[in-house]
Amino acid sequence: MDTLIGLKGKDFIVLGADTYSINSIIKLKNDDNTKFYDINGNKCLLLGGSIGDRIQFGEFIRKNVHLYQYQNSTDLFVKSFAYFTRKNLAYYLRRNPYEVNCLIAGHDNVRRK
C-alpha cells in the first residue's frame, strides 16, 4: 500500500510520499522518485499504485501538458490541470485501466487584485 499525503496552509503546500514499491507480496525500496511529477514548476502530481501504471500515466500526463503549452503558448491553470488528469483517468478506466491514485497540488502564477 502506498502512502501519499498533502497539507495545505495559507500560503504553502507540503506533499509527501513513501519510497516503497509493492509488487505482489514483495515490498521494494525505490529511490528513483517515480511518485513525484513536477509539471512546469508550479504544479505537482503524486501517483500511487503499481510502478508500471504509475510511470506510464505520469509520463502521459506530463508530456500532454507540455504539448498543450507548446501548441497554445500558455500554461494550464491548476484547476484545468486537475480536470485534464481526472478526464484522462476516467477515460482509461474503461479502456486500459490504470491502477493509480492521484494527488494534485499547485499554485497559479496570477496576481490577485
Image: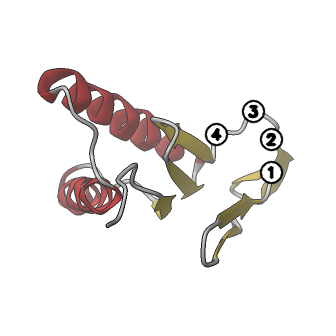
Residue topped by disc 3: 32
Amino acid marked by disc 1: Thr
The reply to whether dot 1 and dot 2 touch (C-beta < 8 Å) is: yes
Amino acid marked by disc 3: Asp
The reply to whether dot 2 and dot 3 touch (C-beta < 8 Å) is: yes
Q: Residue sitting at 13 percent across and 29 percent down?
A: 72
The reply to whether dot 1 and dot 4 touch (C-beta < 8 Å) is: no
Measure how far apart labels 3 and 1 are at the Cα level. 8 Å
Label 4, residues with CA under 10 Å away: few <14, some 14-19, many ≥20:
some
In primary-sequence order, the first of circles 3 and 1 is 1
Which type of secondary structure does the marked residue at label 2 adopt? loop
Above or below for 75 versus 82 = above
Residue topped by disc 4: 34
Where is residue 91? Give x, y as percent: 18, 57
Which type of secondary structure does the marked residue at label 4 adopt? loop
Label 2, residues with CA under 10 Å away: few <14, some 14-19, many ≥20:
some
Q: Outermost residue toward the top?
A: 70
